[in-house]
């Protein structure tokens, strides 16, 4: 497995337009070839026999990558050859080792990655944005909620708690006493574990920046319900419908000229968003100062209505 920057070092042609035979990548522009093992150039067809230039002095920009639970993770390091020991651990969903997602969806959002990630961690918007017959009614009344949070790794988690109140109808398929655990981690990850007395499920959401104003939002849904296979098309539609509602918010925010960082935080309902930006700032500071990341958060209970 490999991950290279999509640009030939010769003239900048995107390598995705070239050829790959399983071992060698070839640029479509001048035929330069690169080994998939290390990205080093193996041949430059235009060179004559009287030009003894060593092609291996050129190479594609490589990035560390790993496959975990059916997803490929790429660490976009600023360092040319980052130390593997310094790379953050790839988050894992408990109980799904060796499994691949049952349903996946990707949608391109017209906003930066931070604003896309806010949709993962804003607890107040679902009552007004995620309203569907299959999820929750627009007429559902707001309820007082209290959740307990604690710092973990590069983020924080909501301690496991019982599902109650309106919403979450699909979770009922897992049986009774459904319990949910939620983790938010840098750079833009949301990991939700849902466990019932019969089955379990999990949802992994990730924001992948494409450029300063564009982000791909990925949703991966896992489950252990054996008889759910015929329902994959409907589950895929549900996932995209849920994602579409957040996409429409991003479009409207762009119309309003939303700032990169929200200008106002009000009450506990906005605390998680504020924490996310604190975590991002600490990561940047730790990299700039050459020191380990220190999670700045503490255990805390938050209360809001949703």
Image: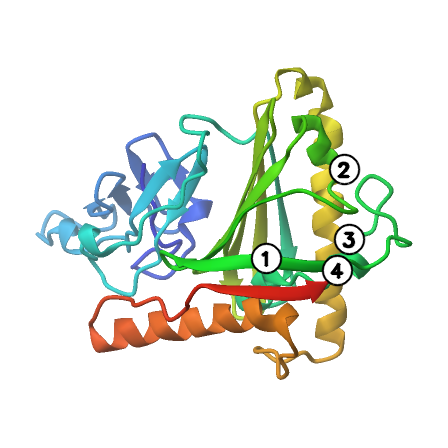
- Residue matched to label 2: 169
Disc 3, SS: loop
- Residue matched to label 1: 147
Please name which of the two marks, 3 or 2, marks the residue nearer to the observer: 2
Please report contact status of discs 1 and 4: CB closer than 8 Å, yes or no.
no
Residue 91 is left or right of residue 178, and the answer is left
**Counting residues from the N terminus, which is met first, the one under dot 1 or under dot 4?**
1
Q: Which quadrant of the figure contains the N terminus? A: top left
Label 1 vs label 4: CA separation? Answer: 12 Å
Quarter-wise, where is residue 167 in the image?
top right
Residue at x 67% of width, y 28% of height: 176
**Counting residues from the N terminus, which is met first, the one under dot 3 or under dot 2?**
3
Please report contact status of discs 1 and 3: CB closer than 8 Å, yes or no.
no
Q: Residue furthest bottom?
A: 263
Q: Relative to 48, is 142 above or below? A: below
**Counting residues from the N terminus, which is met first, the one under dot 2 or under dot 1?**
1
Disc 1, SS: strand
Q: Nearer the viewer, residue 8 or 265?
A: 265
Task: Where is residue 56? Give x, y as percent.
Answer: 15, 50
Label 2 vs label 1: CA separation? Answer: 20 Å
- Residue matched to label 4: 306
Residue 296 is left or right of residue 170, and the answer is left
Please report contact status of discs 2 and 1: CB closer than 8 Å, yes or no.
no
Label 4 vs label 3: CA separation? Answer: 11 Å
Residue 222 in view, yes or no:
no
Residue 181 is left or right of residue 241, and the answer is left
Please report contact status of discs 2 and 4: CB closer than 8 Å, yes or no.
no
Label of residue 130 in the image: 3
Please report contact status of discs 3 and 2: CB closer than 8 Å, yes or no.
no
**Counting residues from the N terminus, which is met first, the one under dot 1 or under dot 3?**
3
Label 2 vs label 4: CA separation? Answer: 16 Å
């Amino acid at each position: 497995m490999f991950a290279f920057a999509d640009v030939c070092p010769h003239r900048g042609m995107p390598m995705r337009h070239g050829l790959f035979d399983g071992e060698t990548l070839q640029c479509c522009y001048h035929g330069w070839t690169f080994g998939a093992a290390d990205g080093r150039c193996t041949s430059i067809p235009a060179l004559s026999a009287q030009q003894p230039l060593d092609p291996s002095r050129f190479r594609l920009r490589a990035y560390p990558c790993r496959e975990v639970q059916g997803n490929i993770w790429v660490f976009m390091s600023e360092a040319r050859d980052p130390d593997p020991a310094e790379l953050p651990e790839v988050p894992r969903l408990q109980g799904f080792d060796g499994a691949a997602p049952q349903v996946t969806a990707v949608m391109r959002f017209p906003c930066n990655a931070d604003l896309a990630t806010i949709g993962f961690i804003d607890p107040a918007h679902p009552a007004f944005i995620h309203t569907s017959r299959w999820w929750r009614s627009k007429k559902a009344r707001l309820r007082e909620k209290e959740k307990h949070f604690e710092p973990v790794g590069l983020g924080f988690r909501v301690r496991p708690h019982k599902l109650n109140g309106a919403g979450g109808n699909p979770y009922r398929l897992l049986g009774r006493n459904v319990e949910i655990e939620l983790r938010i981690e840098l750079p833009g990850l949301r990991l939700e574990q849902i466990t019932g007395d019969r089955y379990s499920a999990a949802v992994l959401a990730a924001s992948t920046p494409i450029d300063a104003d564009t982000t791909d939002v990925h949703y991966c849904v896992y489950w252990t319900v054996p008889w759910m296979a015929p329902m994959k098309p409907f589950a895929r539609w549900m996932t995209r419908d849920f994602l579409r509602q957040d996409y429409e918010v991003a479009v409207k925010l762009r119309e309003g000229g939303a700032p990169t960082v929200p200008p106002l935080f009000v009450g506990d309902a906005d605390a998680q968003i504020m924490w996310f930006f604190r975590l991002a700032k600490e990561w940047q500071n730790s990299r700039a100062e050459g020191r380990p990341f220190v999670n700045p958060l503490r255990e805390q209970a938050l209360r809001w209505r949703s």
